[in-house]
Image (cartoon, coloured by chain):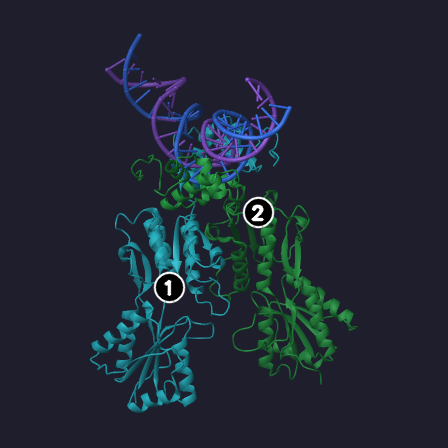
Chain colours: A cyan, B green, C purple, D blue
DNA sequence: ACTGCCGTCTAATACGCATCAGATCACGAT
DNA sequence: ATCGTGATCTGATGCGTATTAGACGGCAGT
């Protein structure tokens, strides 16, 4: 490699961008003085106006731009928020599940003055995809994690670090060590049940997904709580688990004839249960809400075509993303130690009164 | 802030992560030796096996993880690709215009082993939103730019830098200095015209947007070229500019009665022209393709519900994103100097034979 | 035995900025 | 005349890693 520096520049320089030292030389002061004036900000009291002017002028003349890397190395902060998703962030098939979160994250990050660093390189590197990420993650001042299943071991190691971290979603396995922003599915589901009860429904069925993701567990808990609060009996088989494949037309008819008047189901990434239910109903000739009432937990955001149609609740994804960013930046700023920050936040989901549930006949 | 260093560590240390110096002490060698062994990779010949083992063991024992910041400062590379969009990357209203690009960018970045650094903070900082970009952008090894209108002055300054840059979209104002990956609208539009001509259409109208974005200019050029190539006359008024507001039902009727059998229009961010045309047609009672044939340039990607319906062409956004990343990483690797890299790339857009255009009666 | 050379490792330094402990000087108070 | 005392600025150093020049021994060749 040849010393590509300009005239009068030390040989090691890889670039010809001006540095603070150049400004200092031009202004006839020392490099620390330049540093104080340019980045010291409010701490730059005790600098003569004359000196300040000279330095500013020199910086302007040279077109100085601070090197973020050096800044970070020296100061230990670079206004970068890491964003780590356990799957591809921009999925091809799945209808942009992360998108509403990202909208909130982006907005709030911008407000807080942080840029977003998306860690994706490792998603294709091989067998232990998340092992090496943790190295890179430290590049940011703090990191946001999202995704249905988080890798326990890697998370454990990360938490042993002093890097601020926030998980988007509820997760209590790490106790207080893992701050998160989640959705209050329990309360929201109970409210949906209460809404149905107020419409006169007493025989309510809950059709949920197979796997035990926290959201599913919470929703079922909310369902049971809501039923209990309304004094409704929860007979055997009132909670149905399915991945969609066994949700036949006959089964649906059976429920109907047994006297079920309302069905609660949940929308998820895959939407298996929800979709299967709609399919079976359409095939059996049942209409919502004429024949059966339907409530969907966590319905997708409004689309552009008109008001919400599905009764249920909507997860405030945008607000959750923004809240997560606020929590993270708070932790970075060190508010965590003072206990000013609620490290575990559950956002409430608004009840949506749509057109799929009606008063029982 | 308190000096949180552990026991035996210098007070200035902000973190208790092990450094190369710690490994060196534990293994009884010097820090440069550790550096050589751990990151030197192939250049680490000339190291005794015994030493190598000791160092590796010590690194493993301490759970060493290299600091990307320091690495970058020292080596001038950090495997980060910047992504700068001139508007919010995750828009709320607009139907995820950037999304398909992002899918390609993410995939290819992962393959190339780069993480993605999204610069967003400046979008809210005030009057000259992009002025401060230069500061941040240099954090990455190279930067991808996207957005309809790029700020000339800032780009000019950036190009004076040695930072590799790629623009997603065609832009020739900077000559060869701004590498880009664009779409070949001219050829694609000409092919659409040819397709219509083969269906027997001779009176073809082109309805385009008002503003002179490059895509619009190219498409019109392609339209004219296509007409010429097919030996079709281009009479006065064959090209209509509109922002949608003046596209009345009467006007559409006028065209129809004048003998126009096919209309070519373009889909853009706002979709103003395209949407207005559809609205007017629907209001006038015209159906596609029964009454009029319609071709849409740059139709949105397939949605999940079935095969494409619109005749026209589709912009290969995913591939463009991937190509842009390849170009950028190539530039970073220094392939640019050897002329191995096509700094200006135009990707072809596949003709879509949909259901809105039919053989003329 | 002296020279030359290879293999192995280390001292020194760069990278660009921030921070801290003084240095320097002027000025007023004792 | 001496001693603070505040206002301004600088020297030295750190941040964690990569790189380069060269130190140090040992071994072969003459």
Q: Which quadrant, please, contains the C terminus of chain A?
A: bottom left
Which residue lies most toward the bottom here? A257
Please give the label number shown on residue B6: none
Q: Which residue is mark 1?
A: A149
Which residue lies most toward the right here? B231
Q: Chain of mark 2?
A: B
Callout 1 secondary element: loop
Q: Chain of mark 1?
A: A
Which numbered mark, 1 or 2, is in the foreground of this view?
1
For the question of whether residue A251 can be seen, the reply is yes
Q: Which quadrant, please, contains the N terminus of chain A?
A: top right
Q: Which residue is mark 2?
A: B154
Asked if both marks, 1 and 2, belong to the same chain, the answer given is: no
Q: Please state the horizontal and vertical placement of residue A142, each as a whole percent of the image.
A: 38, 50
For the question of whether residue A113 can be seen, the reply is no
Q: CA distance from mark 1 to mark 2?
A: 42 Å
The vertical placement of A73 against A184, above or below, is above
Q: Please state the horizontal and vertical placement of residue A27, each as a whole percent of the image.
A: 52, 28
The vertical placement of B195 against B110, above or below, is below
Residue at x-position 70% and y-position 79%: B261
């Amino acid at each position: 490699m040849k010393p590509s520096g300009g005239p009068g520049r030390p040989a090691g320089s890889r670039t010809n961008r001006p540095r603070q030292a150049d400004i200092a030389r031009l202004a006839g002061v020392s490099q620390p003085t330049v540093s104080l004036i340019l980045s010291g900000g409010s701490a730059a009291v005790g600098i003569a106006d004359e000196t300040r002017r000279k330095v500013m002028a020199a910086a302007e003349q040279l077109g100085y731009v601070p090197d973020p890397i050096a800044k970070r190395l020296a100061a230990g902060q670079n206004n970068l928020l890491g964003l780590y998703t356990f799957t591809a962030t921009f999925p091809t098939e799945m209808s942009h599940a992360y998108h509403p979160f990202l909208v909130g994250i982006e907005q709030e990050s911008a407000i807080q003055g942080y840029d977003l660093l998306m860690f994706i390189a490792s998603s294709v590197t091989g067998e232990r995809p998340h092992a090496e990420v943790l190295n890179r993650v430290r590049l940011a001042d703090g990191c946001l994690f999202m995704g249905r299943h988080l890798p326990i071991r890697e998370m454990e190691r990360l938490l042993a670090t002093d890097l601020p971290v926030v998980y988007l979603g509820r997760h209590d396995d790490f106790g207080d060590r893992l701050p998160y922003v989640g959705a209050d599915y329990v309360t929201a589901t109970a409210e949906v049940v209460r809404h149905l009860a107020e419409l006169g429904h007493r025989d309510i069925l809950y059709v949920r997904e197979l796997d035990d993701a926290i959201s599913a567990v919470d929703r079922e808990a909310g369902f049971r709580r809501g039923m209990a609060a309304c004094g409704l009996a929860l007979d055997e088989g009132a909670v149905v688990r399915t991945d969609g494949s066994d949700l036949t037309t006959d089964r649906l008819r059976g429920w109907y004839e047994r006297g079920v008047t309302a069905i609660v189901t949940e929308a998820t990434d895959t939407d298996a249960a929800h979709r299967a239910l709609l399919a079976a109903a359409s095939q059996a000739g049942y209409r919502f809400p004429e024949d059966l009432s339907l409530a969907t937990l966590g319905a997708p955001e409004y689309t552009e075509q008109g008001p919400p149609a599905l009764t249920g609740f909507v997860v405030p994804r945008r607000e959750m993303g923004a809240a997560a960013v606020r929590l993270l930046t708070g932790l970075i700023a060190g508010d965590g130690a003072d206990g000013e920050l609620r490290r575990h936040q559950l956002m409430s989901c608004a009840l949506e009164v749509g057109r799929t549930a009606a008063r029982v006949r």
